[in-house]
């Protein structure tokens, strides 16, 4: 196998580099470091040449909006964009995932799901194949699950927002949940909406089970914001705070006792609140929470840059510290099992020959006399060797498959126990294939070093890790200034400019006085 990407991957990476050159040059050099990781992965068998680490992660900041029907998701999106893009209503007005992107055109457009399924720049690329895994034949109906809308809102520039159908849908349920899990994994920020008109656990049980219950153990749980929308409907209650308390108790019942919780409503569509004191309190809380949510949405571009560089660093470290040890251990077990099977096969052969030797002269079949019967003895020897070789390679193949299944079991266990390990294993590539590449027929079972792993490979990973640290430092210099040096320099420059201006004024005044005296 050639250790270089095929044509389709090269074209995708070229398009990605073109996009980054225009949108985010800071990440342009990161692509070349992913290519270095690809080279190591191709040699080790972690990636197929039709894959790349760079294409397995999203490069566009992604905000997903999830929740129940009539929870006000669409109204929130319209309010944020300042654009009446999404249909709103108490019933299910949109039963498909809507990917909202920026467009230079002032005219909003609605594009079919095929626009997303066939474009590698978007998070639902080739999603029809994933839907087919859930429901055979449903992948052809991709337009029934996805659509894309464009907006000219400046707030959307540089990011993608995904509006999801409600969780309490019965039709297409499995496919919707699979797509939901997909976008949650890719998203930089996940807004989970609940309806304040139905805060009791029964009405949002589905959302609680699938999102909240599965979120607690995730390593990226900080990207989830839980929002109780349409809280204005509780203003008429004797104790409106009890509505929020009931909602938080429902979340706590699923194990979520910490996190970011917000309560908001759409002031344009709000229920009139007659008590002025209550209205001001509700408005202040709503404005405060909305400002915090909007700020998080604004920050996703910065967070995505750090996530991408973090993924680069994670993959480099995991190949060396997780993949290689796992493959080495699998190879050690494979060698032990092959030798054991070979020994058992030979012992079984001797046992059968000993038993048959009690009645027949079977040992004469394996007697070789090269002095008188050279041809016959050579055939006998060849058949004997061929038999042992066949048994040996059968044992190799059986042991390799057995060990490979155990590797998959180990990874599955890590997924269920540790969200961080799950993400790392997924990003690092296919460990099963990396192991099986070491069990190919022409490779000795006594070679302890995995295919593609060498001092050169280790140096490449070390260099990528060092480069990732430099990228992070560059972003820190761009987005932060802990030392305050830039402010100090600006203050000094301002002071110098003021001093120079004052000196010029003094000199000018002295010149005027001199001329006055002369007159």
Image (tube, helix red, strand yellow):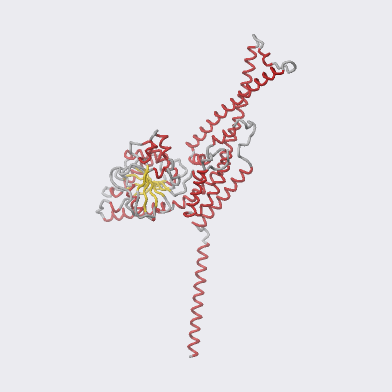
Badge count:
0
Could you tell whether 437 is left or right of 260 in the image? right
Residue 186: % across, % down? 44, 44
Along the viewing direction, whichever of 292 and 105 lies nearer the viewer: 105
Could you tell whether 199 is left or right of 385 in the image? left
Residue extending furthest front? Answer: 375
Residue 491: % across, % down? 50, 67
Residue extending furthest left? Answer: 274
Residue 28: % across, % down? 52, 52
Residue extending furthest bottom? Answer: 519
Q: Is residue 481 above or below residue 221?
A: below
| Quarter where residue 2 is shown | top right
The quadrant in which the N terminus is found is top right
Seen at 44% across and 49% down, the residue is: 61
Could you tell whether 157 is left or right of 468 in the image? left
Seen at 58% across and 33% down, the residue is: 330
Residue extending furthest right? Answer: 371
| Quarter where residue 212 is shown | top left
- Residue 365 visible: yes
Residue 475: % across, % down? 51, 54
Along the viewing direction, whichever of 26 and 369 lies nearer the viewer: 369
- Residue 285 visible: no
Could you tell whether 291 is left or right of 494 in the image? left
């Amino acid at each position: 196998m050639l250790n270089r990407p095929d044509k389709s991957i090269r074209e995708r990476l070229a398009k990605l580099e073109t996009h980054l050159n225009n949108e985010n040059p800071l990440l342009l050099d990161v692509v070349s470091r992913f290519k270095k990781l690809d080279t190591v992965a191709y040699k080790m068998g972690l990636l197929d040449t039709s894959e790349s680490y760079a294409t397995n992660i999203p490069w566009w900041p992604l905000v997903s909006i999830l929740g129940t029907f009539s929870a006000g998701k669409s109204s929130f999106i319209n309010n944020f964009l300042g654009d009446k893009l999404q249909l709103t209503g108490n019933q299910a007005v949109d039963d498909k995932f809507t990917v909202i992107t920026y467009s230079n055109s002032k005219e909003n457009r609605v594009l079919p799901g095929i626009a997303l399924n066939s474009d590698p720049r978007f998070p639902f690329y080739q999603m029809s194949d994933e839907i087919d895994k859930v429901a055979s034949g449903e992948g052809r109906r991709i337009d029934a699950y996805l659509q894309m809308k464009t907006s000219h809102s400046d707030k959307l520039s540089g990011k993608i927002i995904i509006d999801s159908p409600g969780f309490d849908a019965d039709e297409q349920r499995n496919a919707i949940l699979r797509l939901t899990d997909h976008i949650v994994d890719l998203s930089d920020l996940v807004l989970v909406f609940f309806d304040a008109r139905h805060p009791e656990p029964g009405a949002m049980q589905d959302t609680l089970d699938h999102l909240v219950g599965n979120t607690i153990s995730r390593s990226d749980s900080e990207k989830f914001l839980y929002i109780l929308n349409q809280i204005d409907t509780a203003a008429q209650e004797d104790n409106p705070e009890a509505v929020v308390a009931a909602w938080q108790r429902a979340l706590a019942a699923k194990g979520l006792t910490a996190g970011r919780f917000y309560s908001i409503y759409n002031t344009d569509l709000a229920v009139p609140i007659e008590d002025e004191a209550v209205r001001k309190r509700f408005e202040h809380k709503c404005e405060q929470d909305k400002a915090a949510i909007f700020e998080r949405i604004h920050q996703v571009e910065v967070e995505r840059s750090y996530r991408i560089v973090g993924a680069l660093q994670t993959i480099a470290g995991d190949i060396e510290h997780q993949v290689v040890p796992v493959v080495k251990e699998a190879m050690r077990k494979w060698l032990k099992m092959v030798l054991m099977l070979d020994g058992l096969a030979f012992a079984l052969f001797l046992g059968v020959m000993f038993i048959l030797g009690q009645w027949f002269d079977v040992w004469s079949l394996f007697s070789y006399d090269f002095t008188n019967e050279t041809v016959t003895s050579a055939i006998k020897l060849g058949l004997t060797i061929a038999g042992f070789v066949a048994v040996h390679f059968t044992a190799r193949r059986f042991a390799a498959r057995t060990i490979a299944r155990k590797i998959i079991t180990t990874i599955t266990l890590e997924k269920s126990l540790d969200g961080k390990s799950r993400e790392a294993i997924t990003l690092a590539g296919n460990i099963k294939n990396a192991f099986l590449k070491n069990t190919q027929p022409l490779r000795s079972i006594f070679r302890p070093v995995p295919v593609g792993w060498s001092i050169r490979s280790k140096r490449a990973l070390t260099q990528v890790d060092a480069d990732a640290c430099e990228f992070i430092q560059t972003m820190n210099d761009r987005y932060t200034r802990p030392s305050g040096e830039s402010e100090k320099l600006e203050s000094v420059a301002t002071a110098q400019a003021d001093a120079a201006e004052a000196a010029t004024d003094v000199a000018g005044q002295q010149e005027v006085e001199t001329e006055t005296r002369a007159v």
